[in-house]
Amino acid sequence: MFTKLNFKQIIRFTIAGGFAALTNIISRIFFSIFFSYKLAILLSFFIGLSTGFILMRKYVFVFKRNLLFSQIVRFFFINLLNLIQTFLITLGIKYILGFVLSNVGIIELISHMLGVSFPIITSYFAHKYFTFR
């Protein structure tokens, strides 16, 4: 199953995922103007999720046999697990950085960036062998 890694695909995944993460972070900054930090994280998740699905399906995991609806459901499921990881890690890092830094905006930005970055490796394999198989 994991014997041969497709490094071009991993690079495309990283670029597409990085762009989706960037849209997630930028939308969280925007949502933070109107909503609490926690709600902004949750809302921005759906922006990043939509962006990620479109990019992954079009540029990373192309020519797959399963149906679009099946891919959407599986993609959502995997990313729901990632949301839980991201949410807990982001809040944990924010708590820890609160002891070291005083600028709440910087703390929230750093925390969210690290939280969004955490599930990159597990996401790749989950999407390759489950979502877009």
Image (cartoon, rainbow, N blue to C red):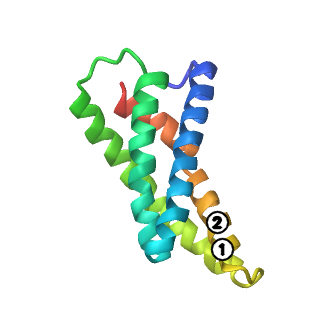
Q: Can residue 128 be seen in this view?
A: no
Asked whether, in this view, residue 72 is left or right of residue 55, the answer is left
Task: Say left or right for 42 vs 113.
Answer: left
Residue drawn at (51%, 63%) of the image: 30
Residue 118 visible from this viewpoint:
yes
Residue 101, how many percent across, how many down? Answer: 76, 80
Tell me if mark 2 has few (under 14), some (14-19) or many (20+) residues whose alpha carbon lies within 10 angstroms of its own: some
Quick one: which residue is furthest to the right in this view? 100
Check residue 72 in the rendering and tell me which mark sits there, or answer none.
none
Foreground residue among 105 and 7: 105
On the image, the x and y values in percent for residue 82 come to: 45, 53
Tell me: 90 left or right of 130. Answer: right
* 94 horizontally vs 48: left or right: right
Secondary structure category for the residue under label 2 = helix
Q: Mark 1 points at which residue?
A: 105
Q: Which amino acid does label 1 sit on?
A: Gly
Q: How far apart are marks 2 and 1 (CA)?
A: 6 Å
* Residue at (25% x, 28% y) in the render: 68
> Cβ–Cβ below 8 Å for labels 2 and 1?
yes
* Mark number displayed over residue 109: 2
Asked if 117 appears above or below 50 in the picture, the reply is below
Vertical relation: 59 (above or below) 38? above
Q: In which quarter of the image is residue 90?
A: bottom right
- Give how far across and how far down residue 6 sits, in percent: 58, 19
The quarter in which the C terminus is drawn is top left
> Residue sitting at 64 percent across and 65 percent down?
109
Q: Which residue is drawn at 40% across and 37% down?
A: 53
Residue 98 spot, x, y in % from top left: 69, 82
Name the residue type under label 2: Leu
Mark 1: few, some, or many residues within 10 Å (few <14, many ≥20)? few
Q: Element type at marker 1?
A: helix
